Amino acid sequence: ATCPEDQIERRGFEGWFQMSVSEIGSILQGSGDPEDFSFALNNLHRLLESDASTQGECIAMGAADATVAALERRKCGTLAEGHLAAVKIMRTLMRNPEGLRWMVQGRAVQALSGVLRSSDDYGQSAAQEAVIVFLTLSASRANEEALLRSGAVEAMLEFVKGAQGGGQADVLAMKVLMNLSSSASVRTLLVGSGGIETLLAIAGADESGERQTQALKNLMNLAASMDLKVEMLDRGAVQVLMRSIQAGTAQGTEESLLALKAVMNLVCHQDTKVPMVGQGVIEAMLSLCSSGEVPPEHQVQCVRILMSMATHRDTKLPMVERGAADIAVALARQALGQG
């Protein structure tokens, strides 16, 4: 009989499927050279992908848990392809209910959080693959507890903070945060971990693109929460959002529309209306409404913001003094003329 270690020596193309799940598990549970672990993990991934019936066996015989341990202990050393294969194994296993239960009930999610926290050690490809796993998990509220327990939210935020932009992994990570932020527990974590400041820094950066767009979507979503409106105002959200509005509204950019919607969400609170007067929101909205160059969808948001501002007794006089009544009449005449 050929032992697993002998199998490792046969690394040709046809050698990928010569080892069984149990043989691969024996290698992963032992100690050895990082190249051996990398080879075994790649072998296991290909086996699971080629034969779905082996996925249950992988869990039952401990090969899945051994994969998690190999990832936690970085048994593949500096071999990024080995770490990537380990994450891919988890992504493959979670496609079926048994594998998903194994993931959320064991240490797999925590191990993936570690990949994000140490992406320089594990490799960017493994980190991106881990983010994709988290994106899938975050789509279901049933997985929220496991993600919170494993430190995935904090790891995701650290990953976004450390990203330099230009790639897709941090954009996907912000989508994960977007999925999870409907939970009050997650929102509390985000605030306590500097999430608002991180998103504002990305949204207010000079470069535009998908990264900035996703940050604005997150801010718009967070601003809809009644318990975060004042917090966001205190952390400078209005100034950042107003810059995005002023920079892109005339051109009708998606970023400026998202920023307008975020301001609309912020103003829907009695404790934010008066402070927002002092931050120039009324003047900016009135200027955009009267410019004649603002796309209709953007103009509607400007009007909605002004209407919400007008519901507070202490904002009525400042609005009149700034010409809100005259602009409202002009807009009404314009609407009647178009009708």
Image (tube, grey):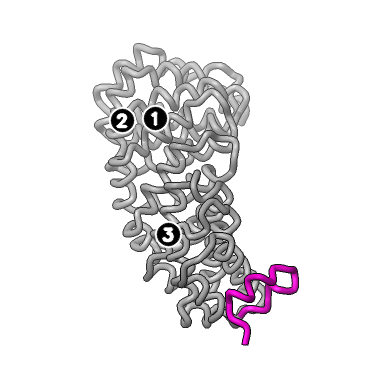
Q: Is residue 16 left or right of residue 125?
A: right
Residue 51 appears in which quarter of the rendering? bottom right
Report the residue marked by disc 2.
311
Mark carried by residue 125? none
Cβ–Cβ below 8 Å for labels 1 and 2? yes
Secondary structure type for disc 3: loop
- State how far apart marks 1 and 3 are (Cα): 58 Å
Q: Which residue is mark 1?
A: 307
Task: Look at mark 3 in the image and give the residue it sits on.
Answer: 73
Callout 1, which amino acid? Met
Q: Residue at x 56, y 75 (%)?
A: 24
Which residue is found at the position 44% from the left and 41% from the top? Answer: 218
Q: Residues within 10 Å of mark 2 (few under 14, many from 20)?
A: few
Q: At numbered mark 2, what does the secondary structure look like: helix, strand or loop?
A: loop
Residues shaded magenta: 1-19
Residue 281: percent from the left, percent from the top?
Answer: 39, 21
Q: CA distance from mark 3 to mark 2?
A: 59 Å
- Residue 197, image x and y in percent? 37, 32
Q: Is residue 16 magenta?
A: yes
**Mark 1 or mark 3: whose residue is earlier in sequence:** 3
* Residue type highlighted by circle 2: Thr
Q: Amino acid at mark 3?
A: Arg
Residue 328 visible, this orientation: no
Out of 19 and 104, give the one closest to the viewer.
Answer: 19
Residue appearing at x 51%, y 20% in the figure: 246
Q: Nearer the viewer, residue 297 or 24?
A: 24
